[in-house]
Structure formats: C-alpha cells, structure tokens
Amino acid sequence: MSVSKLVFAPLSFTGWGSLEHLLPETAKHNPKKILVVTDPMLEKIGLTKRVTDPLEQEGYEITVNTDVVPEPPLETGEKLVDFTRKGGFDMVVGVGGGSALDLAKLAAVLATQEGKVADYLNLSGTKSISQKGLPMALIPTTSGTGSEVTNIAVLSLGTTKDVVTHDYLLADVAIVDPALTVSVPSKVTAATGIDALTHAVEAYISVNASPATDALALQAMRLISRSLREAVENGEDRQAREDMSHGSFLAGLAFFNAGVAGVHALAYPLGGQFHIAHGDSNAVLLPYVMSYIRKSTVSRMADILEAIGGNSAFLSDEEASYKCVEELQRIVKDVGIPSTLAGFDIPESALESLTADGVKQKRLLDRSPLKLGEEDIRRIYQSAFNGV
Ligand code: NAD
C-alpha cells in the first residue's frame, strides 16, 4: 500500500445561500482594500454585484477588475499581477468560472513575490513560490473546473497550456453557492459539467488514486450523471444546479489529490491550437481516451459505469468496461456536444501538431494507468477524427 498525501483544503462553504459566509470570512482578514477579479460578462449581468454590494455596505474599499478572458493567456496574467502589485490591495476575491478564479489566484499569490508570472510556470519557469500571498476568497459561478479547491492556475501559451502550481495558490475560503450558477447558459453548463465529470473519472483511474479520492470521485460521478442533463435543459432546476455544484466541488477535491491524466493531456492542445473551450475539449476526447486505455483499468471502468447510472447487472467487468465507454459517449451526446473533432471544424491535417503538443504534457500523461507514448496519442486523436 503506498502513502497518499491528501489536502482537503481550503475551508469551504457549499450549498444554496452559502454566499452569506463571505462577510464573516472576509472580516477574519481585516482587509481595507479588496480586489475583485471577475469577467466582463458577470459584471454586465449583475452577478458580480451580488458579491461586491454586501462588501461595500460593510465599508470595504472595492476595486473590480474585469480583464478576465476565457482560457486566459499568459499576458492577461502578467497584466493583472502588475495591477495588483501597484494597487496596494490586502485581499483578493475571485468571482467567476475557472478563468477568473485562476487569475485571482495568480494575483493574490504573486502580489507578494518578485518576478513575472512566466518565471513561475511549471514547464518553462525557473522560480518557485516562496511565501503566502494575499488572503484569497474564491467564488465559482460555473460548475466545472473545481479551481476553487485546487492549487493550480492554468494559462494559455501560444498553442498549448501551462500551469503555476503551489499550495500557496489554495484559497483561504471557497464559497460554492449554486444560486450563482443559475444564469450559466446551456452550452456552458454542458461543457463545464463534462469537465467536472472528466475530473472525477480521471481521478478515479489515476495511478495516484487512493481510497479517499475514490470516495470523492465516485460521489461526484453520481451527482453529475444524475443531474447534468437536467441542468442543461432547465438552468432553473434548483436540485440539478445543487447536484452539479457539489459534484464539481467533489471532483475538484478528487483530482487535486489524485491528478488528471490522458484526457486533459490531449485536450490542452485542442484549446491551445483551436481555441476550443476547456470543457468541450475534454468532452470530445473523454470516450476515445477511455476506450483506448480500457484494458488497463477494466474493473475501475466497471465501477464508473455503476456510478454514472449504467446498468452493470449480470455483466463481467470486461463487458461493463465496454459499456462504460458507451455510457460516457451517450452523456456527451445527450448534452449536445459534438462527438468528433470534425464536429469542432478541426482539420485532419492537424493530427501531427496536436500529437506533438500532446506529448509535451508529461506531468499529466504519467498519471495514466496505461502509459501513453507518441504513437498512442496519435492513434487516439485519429480515432477522435474518425469517430470510432
Ligand atoms: P470560464 O471561466 O472561461 O467561463 C466560460 C464562460 O461562462 C464565460 O464567458 C463566462 O463569462 C461565462 N459564465 C461564467 N459563469 C457564468 C454565470 N454564472 N452566468 C452566465 N455566464 C457565466 O469557463 P470555465 O470552464 O469555468 O473555466 C475554464 C478555465 O479554467 C480554463 O482556462 C481551464 O484551463 C481552467 N481550469 C482550471 C482548473 C484549476 O484547477 N485551476 C481546472 C480545470 C480548468
């Protein structure tokens, strides 16, 4: 039995109405000037105000920065960190999807370090984070990335992605209130929901999985598979939004501790080269990667089938593992996400450049139960082009 390091931080409040915990949690840090990092869409639809109004009424000086863009590039991170250092803030609140939360993490942690964001990147950086940053509260408005409970910030760099990662990127408090997700459009609900499902599935089959992460991942799969379709069809469905909110939170804790693997490794180049949203990239590849690695994790795939609501009665693990791939494919189809790379207008001529960038994601590939080399990656992309 190997030893697992488990970090079930940060302090979190979940469930409908949990936003009310922001004020007492903020008061603990006694800030004067608070930077709120959010995206322009959330500002426009009035969601950001639900966070800033109570803070302002309490007398805090609030600055709202709306420079966040989806799948943020490194330059956006550099600009925001500069802004934070110059602003003299003493707390950061991130409000939004994974893009806003990741940038809020960088703003908070790098405000107190020297150097550029680029210096701290996992693949190409040379510096490591050495001290805690500003106090940080993270408030997700999508049910997908789990960023509110992970120690990673993801940035787009040219045709691929890289991360800044350190336990100092963990929030001081995460507030996961499903009420803030009701306005998420159906397409974003679908993509972010499959992102969360992918986190749970990949954490469950990761070589670093442990009994603790298994429990989180399986419950995340149950909640997501029973409610994702409803949340996509009717965003006002309160039970569905609650399930998705808890599901993405649990999946975030599971993958933070066990890691994600092949699906994410191959999804990053789709985002980098073709600007496909992170959730869509994972969704289109999930069944193909799982089909390819099936043989290496048959009994775990049988467990996944059960957790996602597939009927495994009277099936051998081998049969259940095939059915698991079909069931994952069905969920992706049911929520209206294209099932092939052609469905995203990606030309087959991109096969080699995608493979070349996929191979670079060694940190992720190393967690796959089946070792994935260059030829394996090429074959998986090819099957995602062919649809078989
Ligand atoms: P996002 O943050 O880019 O948001 C997608 C869209 O949804 C945006 O247009 C946004 O304005 C809109 N939106 C968000 N909340 C809304 C709401 N309540 N109502 C209406 N519209 C809303 O998408 P995301 O999938 O949440 O985040 C993706 C980013 O997160 C990527 O950069 C990805 O790499 C990163 N990520 C980070 C982690 C991590 O652990 N740090 C994990 C997975 C992914």
Image (cartoon, rainbow, N blue to C red):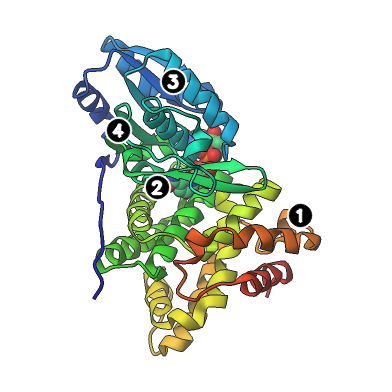
Q: Are marks 2 and 3 in contact (CB under 8 Å)?
A: no
Q: Which residue, given by chain and number where applicable, does mark 3 sit on?
A: 84
**Picture coordinates of residue 369, whole percent (x, y):** 45, 74
What is the tally of numbered marks visible in this picture?
Answer: 4
- Closer-to-camera residue (183/351): 351
Dot 1 crowding, Cα within 10 Å, few <14, some 14–19, many 20+: few
2 or 4: tag closer to the N-terminus? 4
Q: Can you tell which mark lies on residue 132?
A: 4
The secondary element bearing badge 1 is classed as: loop
Mark-to-mark CA distance, 2 and 3: 24 Å
Q: Is mark 2 within 8 Å of ligand 1?
A: yes
Q: Which residue, given by chain and number where applicable, does mark 2 sit on?
A: 146
2 or 3: tag closer to the N-terminus? 3
2 or 1: tag closer to the N-terminus? 2
Mark nearest the camera among 2 and 3 is 3
Please determine whether, in this image, residue 343 is positioned above or below residue 322: above
- Closer-to-camera residue (267/139): 267
Q: Which residue, given by chain and number where applicable, does mark 1 sit on?
A: 345
Please determine whether, in this image, residue 165 is positioned above or below residue 363: above
Q: Is mark 1 within 8 Å of ligand 1?
A: no
**Picture coordinates of residue 328, whole percent (x, y):** 52, 68
Mark nearest the camera among 2 and 4 is 4
1 or 4: tag closer to the N-terminus? 4
Image point (28%, 42%), residue name: 15
Q: Is residue 210 left or right of residue 275?
A: left
